[in-house]
Structure formats: C-alpha cells, structure tokens
Image: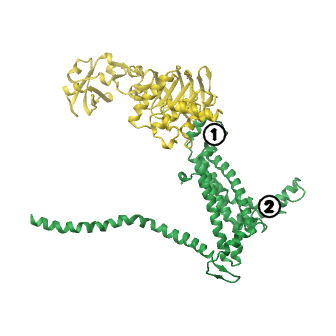
Chain colours: A yellow, B green
Amino acid sequence: MTAGSTVELIKLRKAYGATVAVDGIDLRIPAGSYCCLLGPSGCGKTSTLRMIAGHEDITDGDLLIGDTVVNDQPPARRGTAMMFQSYALFPHLDGTDNVAFSLKMKGVGKEERRRRAREMLDLVDMGAYAARLPAQLSGGQQQRVALARALITHPGVLLLDEPLSALDPFLRVRMREELKRLHREIGITFIHVTHSQTEAMALADIAVVMNKGRIEQAGPPRELFNQPRTAFVARFIGGHNVIDDGAVGGPCAVRTDRIRLGAGALAGEIQVEGTVRSLEYHGAAVHLGLDVPGAADFAVVVDEAGYFAAPVSVGERVRAGWNRTDTHPLVP
Amino acid sequence: MTDTTASSRPSAAAGPAARRGPALLPRLAPYLQAAPLTVVLVLFLLVPILTIVAVSFWDYDSVRIYPDFVLTNYTELLSSPVTWKTYLSTLKYAALTWAITAVIGFTVAYFLAFHVRSTTWQMVLFLLCTIPFWTSNIIRMISWIPFLGRNGLLNSGLISAGIIDQPLEFLLFSDFSVVLAFVHLYTLFMVVPVFNSMMRIDRALIEAARDGGAGGAQILWNVILPLTKPGIAIGSIFVVTLVMGDFITVRLMSGGQSASIGLMIANEISLLQYPAAAANAVVLLAVVLMMVAAMLRVVDIRKEL
C-alpha cells in the first residue's frame, strides 16, 4: 500500500457568491494521521472536504497534497479518493464492477481489474457479496463496497463524507471500529467529516472543530476535551459547563464530571447555588441540569453511587462546587 | 347464573353467521376497487380489439361484409408482395425515426438535465420543447410544405445564396420529408422519458465517477447512458409504435408516393374492405407487440414506472 500523504491547507477559502463557506483556513494534516473535521451543519467542513477532493473549486488559497499544490488538478490526479455520504455506488454495476470502475477508466483489462477488485473486496470482508448489485446490499455492506472502491486506486488520502451517519447506531459503532482498524492497517491519511463529537473523539488523531467557516481549534481529541480554546469548542465537544462569571474572571469551562454536589461541594474552592431543573439516570452516572445564574445549561454528572448516597430531587436547591484547578479559562 | 348462560347461547349461535356478513365485504373489496378500471379496459380496449379480430375472419365483396369464418383475408395479406414491401418501408421509417429521435432526444435531455443548472431555466426550456404540441399534428406537417417545396423557402434561399443552381427535389414528397416530419412530431416523446431518467441520476454518481478518474465521455458512456436506458426504452416504445401505426404523415409528406401499413389499412377502409383492414390491423398489432416485447427484453423499465 502507498504511504499516506500530508495534506496542507493554506488560507483556503470558498465563497458561493456572497456567502463565504470556508473563510481562509490553515491546517496541516500529517501523513498517515486520522483527521476528523467536526462541526455543526453549515460550518464549512463538507466544503473543505470537497475542495480537498477536487469536487469543489477553490476560491482562494492553496491546497497541498504531499509537496505539490493541487488546486487545479482533477480528483483522480490528486492521489485522493472519496467515499460519499450516500456511498454513490453505481446502481447498474455489481460489487466487483463498482470497485473495478476506476481501473476500467484507466484501461486495465477486464480479467485483471476484476481480480484486483475481488482482492480489495476481500480486504473489507465483502468477497462473498461481490456479485450483488448495490440494491441487494444492506447499508453497511454498501459502505464496505464503497470503501473498497475508494481504496482500489491506492490513494494517499482517503476522504470520508459523514460515512457513518446513514447507519443504525449499532452498525455505526461496528463500522467505526472497522475504519480505525483499516486506518491502522493501510496507514494512509484519513480525513473524515462528521457532526458527531463522539465519532471524532473515538477515531481522530487530530480533531478539527469548525464553526462559521473557520477553525475554532485543531488538535488531538484529548487536548480538545481538556483544553477547549473557545466557548464554542467547550460546548460542542460536550461534557463542559461554560461559565461567564465575574467571580472567576472571564469565560471559563468546567468539566461536568469534576463538579460535586452537597457535602462534597463545600470542599470545592468555587461554589455556586442553583435549582435542580432536570434529572436523568444514565446507568453509570446521573446527569443533573441546574438553573444557575451566570451559566446557561449548567450540567453536573455524578457517578451513580455518589448520587444515591445523597439523592436530590427536581426543584430542590443545591450547592455545587469544584476546585480552582478544574476551571479552564476560555478565549472570549 | 342460568340467566347469563341462556342469554349467551343465542349470541354464540349468532356469532358465526354475524361473522360471515362482514367477512364478505373485505373479501370483495379488492375486486370492487379494481372493477371501474376493469370495466373501462374491457369496454374500450378488449371489446374493440376482439371485434377487430372477429371481423378479420369475415368475408366481404365490393358492397358489403358477411359474418363468416374464412382465412382468405390473412392468406391474401401475407401472400401479397405489396404487404411485405409496405412492411419494409414502414420498418425503415420506424428505424430511421427511432435512431434520429434517440440521438436528438438524448442530446436535448442531457443538455437540459446536466448543463442547465437552475431549475427555473430547466422548466422554461422544457416547456419550450413542448410548444410545437400546442398545434395539431396536421398543421405542423403542412407547415413544412411551403418551407421544403421546389419553390419553397429553403430552395429559393439556397439558390439566391448561390449554393445550388437547381432546386433540391428530395426535400419534399420523399422519404426524407416523411422522416423529417416524424422526427419533428415525435422527438419530444423521446426527450421526456430520457430527461426523466436523467433527472433521477444521483449527482453524487457523477462525482464518484470523476473521483475514479473518468473523463466526460467515459462518464457519459459508463454511467449516464446505462442509467438512462429505461428512459430510452420507454421513449423508443412511444416513437416506434407511433410511427408503425401512422398513416397521415406518410400520406401528406410523401405526396402519396410512399406507403405504410397504416396507410394501407386506411385505403382498405375507404374501399369498405373492413375484414381485410381488420386482418391487416391484427397483423400490425402482433408485429408491434413483438417489437415492444423485444425492447422490454433488452431493457428492464419496471423501476422507471
């Protein structure tokens, strides 16, 4: 297999008329890494991916794959391959011919290309379904065929546009593991667009949180979770309370699982008081929503044992507290 | 206690009878729902065809027809060289018209579906294609005559431009003018289903093909054409059946110099040879059905319906 390629975005910009979809972003994705572009819909992540793929013209800036600027190269010459959100399998071709499509376009002989396509299908465990038409395959199977079709060109970069969103939750987790395994095995660069932070956390070496056409923060998921740069990142990644209170000096974030209630709260260096608005039992943990002045949607996650040692009910006034070291200042 | 058993017994006895009543309606409902269409089809499709089939076995002379069962209508029809020649020329018209409308229809539909970006313009241009249909077939045909005639617009234009010295004779009252009129009349029947097929092609497939390294022509040949086949098949059925059954276009545009099966049937009717016309019609129907069946064997149009 080909080694992965570095992908570098320099002041990359995409405008549709007056609307700016991607607003001059800089990003360097090291070769062989798994990068997730993460953000709410309309944040420009898909436009970015499509520009990398070559399915969208670049309005301004440069795109480097490997060492070359590929702004004006057609998709097939960039060394990228894309897996589409709806898989975009050719409905009139069976699994083998779908996978062999790009080889056919290159003029590879029929026997040769079908043999190589079957090898690729075996890699994604779809060898047994090679003769089926896309309509005869389940969503997960279609996705594997689409994956094989993308990989047969031996791309340096694999681009995945919301690859798991069409699957049911159970299959989603399985395919997630599968993608991770595949990435480890073939070692090329993966760029994966998603709006699910769970997916990004589970898969990415580098997660890139985008908002309104800009990059809010890019880094390993652990860094994003523990040191969110902005309030947007803290909220989007989840598991954080964003507090904009003079008492703590500017906006800051506190992980919801670092907050203690009741007696434990009194030991915390920072304390707030609020009314319990909601209560959700999640098994291992209990999620509480508090109405606290100065913080919208103040959430507290208490582990099960801790909660049932001193249960509270909706409407009750409680005190919540945490240590000063757990407050993380945010860029306003 | 006894009271309840007594009162429950008659209701238990009435149970099965009562159940049979409402059970009848659900069983009849599908038939009732299908009945109106069945009646319409029987009255307006099956009965006329059966009448034609029946009359095709009748006998006739120059003044009247006799109910009978004779095969002479068929033997005369099939043994006459005129029939075979006429079939040949009708098939030639059908083949030429089909080939030309398929190419034009595909091109127009392709342009509309893939090159016109805005939906508004797509609709405007599509409606523009239908404008010829606002007038009658006959008027559309006749309007070619002053254009193509010996002293028509085209010939006088070409002569005054110095391109030709003599008027072009083949322009009117020839196979050329017949096919031209057919193409003019029936291209839209090809455009519409092909356009419909093309609009259903997921645009991501085109991108996927480009991602796989396909160029414009390769995308057209490997993706768009195979996915448009059902539309082409439906259009082909329209065009071929229309041309096979036509008589007025051939009569008007060939100036009576060419024949078609439709024209042959029309002539027989005008001579009151109804049984002969009926036999001819039955054979034509069989031929057209076989052609349609052949087309359906090649292309599966079910998913398009």
Residue A64 or residue A127, whichever sits in front: A127
Residue B39 or residue B194, whichever sits in front: B39
**Which residue is under mark 2?**
B148
Amino acid at circle 1: Ile
Q: Chain of mark 1?
A: B
Amino acid at circle 2: Leu
In terms of secondary structure, where does tag 2 sit? helix
**Which residue is under mark 1?**
B219
Instruction: Please name the residue shown 84% across and 63% down the image.
Output: B150
Count every numbered label the image shows and give the total.
2
Residue B128 or residue B250, whichever sits in front: B250
User: Can residue A14 be seen from the camera position used here?
Assistant: no
Image location (x, y in percent) of residue B130: 64, 57
In terms of secondary structure, where does tag 1 sit? helix
Q: Chain of mark 2?
A: B
Image location (x, y in percent) of residue A87: 51, 37
Which image quadrant is residue A242 in?
A: top left
Same chain shared by disc 1 and disc 2: yes
Image location (x, y in percent) of residue A291: 28, 31
Measure the alpha-carbon separation of dots 1 and 2: 39 Å
